Image: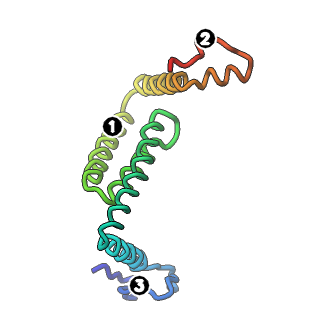
Amino acid sequence: MGDRVVGERHHGAPQESGVPDADGFRPIGILEEAENKWRRRRRRIAANTSLNLAYRIGVGFVGTIVLAAGIVAIPYPGPGWLIVFAGLGILASEFAWAHRMLHWIRARYDRFMEWFSHRSVFVKALGVLFTTIVVVATLWVLGTFDLLGTWVGLEQSWLESPL
């Protein structure tokens, strides 16, 4: 399983040096070897209850921070959804619920983007307008406009954050 035939050569076991052969083929076995090394290391961590708990807490903490940053970044131009998927991917490496959620959210996201790509220019413009309103509103709530106003000598009460 996983063996390949390329150019009349049979490639099964990973090459020792990891260097591509004459026709530039690098067997997948090298990736599998790295994955197996990680699995062995993870099994050693799992064998120690305290270390396993600390590892899972660490993964949970890092994944939650990345996920939260992604959720905050969604309305802004940039990779908000990519960060959300990265955070869920980190969590999914240790938690089954996150794995299920990752697949569920990804399917909904793909379905929405497919639907949105087939809409009229008017609907897409409404999407841009809505995104702009969300960005401006969050910048106002966070006090960004008040801060920028003080930098240029413009101090208006409507620029102040309601917080």
- 72 up-or-down from 95: above or below: above
Q: Amino acid at mark 2?
A: Ser
Q: Earlier in the sequence, mark 1 or mark 2?
A: 1
Where's the N terminus, which quadrant?
Answer: bottom left
- Mark sitting on residue 157: 2
Q: Residues within 10 Å of mark 1 (few under 14, many from 20)?
A: few
| Residue at image coords 37%, 33% | 116
**Residue 115, relative to residue 103: is it above or below?**
above
Q: Residue under label 1, please give it.
A: 112
Q: Is residue 41 above or below residue 83?
A: below
> In the depicted view, which residue is nearer to us: 116 or 143?
143
Q: Mark 1 touching mark 2, by CB under 8 A?
A: no
Q: Position of residue 139 (x, y in %)?
A: 54, 26
Instruction: Give the residue at the far top of this rendering.
Output: 157
Disc 2 to disc 3, C-alpha distance: 68 Å
In the picture as drawn, the residue positioned furthest to the front comes out as 50
Q: Earlier in the sequence, mark 2 or mark 3?
A: 3
Q: Nearer the viewer, residue 77 or 115?
A: 77
| Residue wearing tag 3 | 14
Q: Position of residue 105 (x, y in %)?
A: 30, 44
Q: Residue furthest right?
A: 153
Q: Count neighbours of disc 2 (C-alpha within 10 A) and say few if under 14, some if 14 to 19, many if 20 or more.
A: few
Which numbered disc flags the more N-terminal residue, 1 or 3?
3
Task: Give the secondary structure at mark 2.
Answer: helix
Marks 1 and 3, how far apart in space? 41 Å
Residue 93 vs residue 8, the one in the foreground: 93
Q: Secondary structure at mark 1?
A: helix
Of residues 115 and 136, the one drawn nearer to the viewer in this rendering: 136
